[in-house]
Amino acid sequence: MKHQWQLLFPLALAAAFLAGCQNSLGPNEPLDTTQYTIESTDKFVLLDQAAQGSVTCTGLQERILPDGRLEVVANVKNREKQRLQVQINCVFKDEQGVSTGDITSVQSLTLAENYTEAVKFTSANNLARRYTIQVRETR
């Protein structure tokens, strides 16, 4: 019996310690890491200093439509604890990275605090194989 207490006591003590480390203030804010962001690539460009710290891209999906046009979906995230207004557009490029002249119109996007929104762009012709998504913050 004494041997069981010698095993159970350290386990109970460890469980009580770990339970005490739990955050009772509510859920933790999501952490952003460079592992899951895209803004350091040529596919997603932040055009102004304000957007550098407040907007990120957490994912890009690309696909070629049956008619040969390129469709891109960007997951744009607001890192701030306040609503943000941004402008976003896409410049489509050919295989060599040269603009095809296909530039989407600028869209205004309102992002709630710590919110991610998917934004879709579709090229106007079947020459596009690359792209650059451009974002700037408006205040």
Image: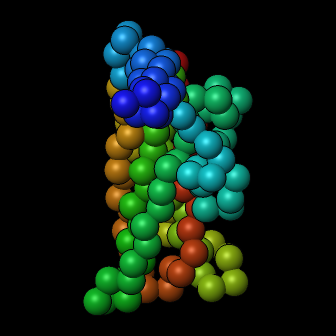
Q: Is residue 82 visible?
A: no
Q: Residue at x 54, y 34 (%)?
A: 31
Q: Residue furthest top?
A: 25
Quadrant housing residue 19 = top left
Quadrant housing residue 44 = bottom right
Q: Position of residue 139 (x, y in %)?
A: 52, 19
Q: Is residue 113 left or right of residue 39?
A: left
Q: Position of residue 119 (x, y in %)?
A: 36, 52
Relative depth, front residue between 101 and 42: 42
Relative depth, front residue between 40 and 32: 32
| Tally of numbered discs | 0
Q: Residue furthest left?
A: 66
Relative depth, front residue between 90 and 64: 64
Q: Position of residue 76 (x, y in %)?
A: 45, 44
Quadrant housing residue 130 = bottom right
Q: Position of residue 110 (x, y in %)?
A: 36, 30
Q: Residue at x 49, y 29 (%)?
A: 6
Relative depth, front residue between 9 and 47: 9
Q: Residue at x 63, y 52 (%)?
A: 35
Q: Is residue 74 visible?
A: yes
Residue 95, above or below 29: below
Quadrant containing the N terminus in the rendered view: top left
Q: How is the image coloured?
A: rainbow
Residue 121, above or below 34: below
Q: Is residue 53 left or right of residue 83?
A: right
Q: Residue at x 46, y 39 (%)?
A: 77
Residue 135, above or below 133: above
